[in-house]
Amino acid sequence: MSDKLIVSRRGLLKTGAAAGVGLAAPMVFSRPAWAYTNEPKGKSVIFGFNVPQTGAYADEGADELRAYQLAVEHLNGEGDGGMLNTFSSKALKGNGVLGKKVEYVTGDTQTKSDAARASAKRMIEKDGAIMITGGSSSGVAIAVQGLCQEAGVIFMAGLTHSNDTTGKDKKANGFRHFFNAYMSGAALAPVLKANYGSDRKAYHLTADYTWGWTQEESIAAATEALGWETVAKVRTPLGAGDFSQYLTPVLNSGADVLILNHYGRDMVNSLTQAVQFGLRDKIVNGKKFEIVVPLYSRLMAQGAGDAVKGIFGSTNWHWSLQDEGSKAFVKSFGQKYGFPPSQAAHTCYVQALLYADACERAGTFNPCGVVEALEGFEFDGMGNGPTLYRADDHQCFKSVLVVKGKENPTSEFDRLEVVDQVPAEQVTYPPDHPMFAGGDLGKCNPGA
Amino acid sequence: MDAFLLQVLNGLDKGSAYALIALGLTLIFGTLGVVNFAHGALFMLGAFCAVAFDKVVTAERVLLDPIKKTPWGTPLEVRVPYAKVWFGDAGEWLIDYSVPISLALAVPVMMLIGVAMERGLIRHFYKRPHADQILVTFGLAIVLQELVKAGFGANPIPMPAPSSYQGMADFGALIGMEPNTVVYPTWRLVYFLFAAAIIGAVFAFLQFTTFGMVVRAGMADRETVGLLGIDIDRRFTFMFGLAAVVAGAAGAMYSPILSPDYHMGMDFLVLSFVVVVVGGMGSLGGAVAAGFLLGILQSFASMNEVKQILPGIDQIIIYLVAVAILLTRPRGLMGRKGVMES
């Protein structure tokens, strides 16, 4: 065997590559303590608005986007300032966030988890979004929240009502301002008892996915605690269109209340058809048959038209509220777009402001700094009264509205009336409540 | 017994829509040999003819209230429909009956759309494989629904039935049962009768008119009819238009049952194809029979008693039956030999 050093071309390449990796490793595996994903280096910072621009919730998504555009204007000191004038925290000055002008990119969730994740990923990796916010579905919110946790950016959820978003699927980088199914049940129960009594038989029609299941569980628990009996829980496929085959069995079931755990197009169709089937005119067990829609939205009420008259439900916020924050937001939004904002628009607008405010108070865009600033943060002046962002699960605790379909609406936007504003204490639950058990918040991830 | 009868009624009512859409699909397939995936979109366009007509008759005169303001500070708008201002009670009646009256708009518009579709696009694909036809018609369906979404938004639009048909009909009393034992929404019964009338009219047209006889002859042997000097292409174009009219009228009258939105056609399309396949490709009678049969089966599968034994059966029953029928009768219930077997 020769001891002569033989250097082949392939060997040289291999050695070179190995040396390169070895030299680069310290740079890759050790990063400065302050580095984080998409740290803004220039004069602007980019927000990522991930909303349904196509698909069944496109109208709701369009309203969310309008609200985000308004929030960006207000953050950059344009327009009348909206809720910046009523927000209890005065960290935001209308000069952007931490001196950087706010810009934004948008993505289309299509109300599909995979499409929503893809658009969020694109905004983070290609467009350099510092945070992601928006959405109109719990399935999407949970999927995008998981992605943001892995990517090391903050996710400020839009409209998501499933208990799981801040329950078993909660994440340290995710925050929800919107209320949840448990809160709907807790807020509705006293009103249902006062109006319909404690001897009722309820029949549930439930959308067959995460949100529907948790709402059914929450509402059934709340009504059973009143003394109501649950006659049946029937799961219906998402987007069934014609629900008549699920409504005819209700007629002879002995139930005297129908609870529709549906949202969006499903709710519009199932409610309209339930009214067509004469359920509201029936007398069962000596009582007038009633329908309850636990989660209402003004856009859905518009779609269902006269079918919503007299029907109880709950909502996160309504444009007719008379507190200073709501009035300021409705004024800004109405002047810009010519109609009042939906609850989806409200929660998205508030989330954008809360994120910006947290960055200002933390003095950084670093997700871990933002998490620290938002956890346990108490604020007011945003339309729902005194509110707490609970540290244990990143859920906002605030008052919940019980609403009823208006008998004599004055316009197409005036379909709901607020019958009760249930205080936060009444809808608060312990962090280890069984309906929210099983998840782990984990640690904040700054990425990079 | 009451529950049983209710589910039968429900099945017939669901089956009416399936049968009408499948009838149009089969007409197109039987005459032109085209698999039209845009047929659901035609149903949706029919529903939006009703919406458009309603928008026209409810067009409002907008006055600004000199005193009252909106919450954002602009003057409050006071809106009154022009129809009421100009025609008084007659205007009110026009608004109330806008859905059935909209058929007067839907029929010519759908005929026009059908003929334009056939002459402008579909005829270029007669000699292409079925896969190409499916792709182009499916693409067309997407374009049509996006156009509707751009014009009318993504939210469902409520379309009330005429006020005198909004309540419940005592069907039990009609067939000699105790009053109020079997009650069913009046408009859904009207829809069933409407569907029966349309199906009857299409069959009568094909069976008892010279035009229909030529079309049937063309369906059986297009080449020979052509050799006899008859312009069969022109008649088949008309049949495409007729199929579009059937789908459109079905959609317009269905709008009080299912609030129209841009996606409603897709919901019916897959089901209707299953109906056509189960009935037998190219068989008009088979499509109608299968439409009602599958409607009734779907309705029964949704009963709690059935779902307790077989959870989720309501969501797959139609496809299970399709598999069972195709295994035992590969040409479908009333399929003809030689259709799609080349």
Image (cartoon, helix red, strand yellow):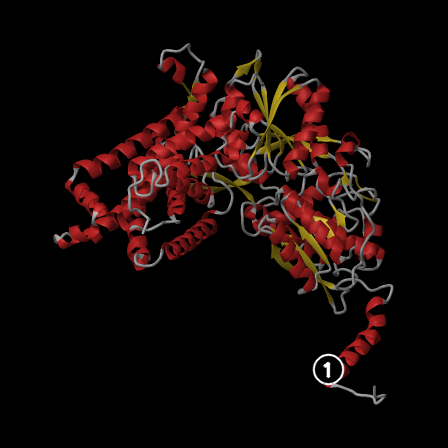
Left of A372 or right of it: where is B135? left
Q: Quadrant of the C terminus of chain A?
A: bottom right
Q: In the image, is residue A10 above or below residue B139?
A: below
Chain of the residue under the numbered disc 1 shown in the image: A
Answer above or below: position of A36 versus B170.
Answer: below
Residue at the extreme left = B228
Name above or below for residue A333 compared with residue A213.
Answer: below
Q: Foreground residue, A413 or A148?
A: A148
Q: How many marks?
A: 1
Judging depth in this view, the residue of B18 and A196 nearest the camera is B18
Taking the image as drawn, is residue B99 in sight?
no
- Give the residue at x 30% y 40%: B283
Residue B262 coordinates in the image, percent (x, y): 46, 46
Q: Residue at x 19, y 53 (%)?
A: B223
Q: Which residue is mark 1?
A: A10
Decide if residue B316 is on the left or right side of residue A417: left
Give the x, y percent position of residue A97: 76, 60
Seen from the viewer's position, the closer of residues A86 and B113 is B113
- Looking at the image, residue B267 sits to the left or right of residue A437; the answer is left
Please identify the residue farthest to the front as the structure is shown.
Answer: A1
Does A119 sit left or right of A152 as displayed?
Answer: left
Is residue B312 at least partly visible in the picture?
A: yes
Type of residue at label 1?
Arg
Residue A432, image x and y in percent?
A: 82, 35
Secondary structure state at the residue bearing disc 1: helix
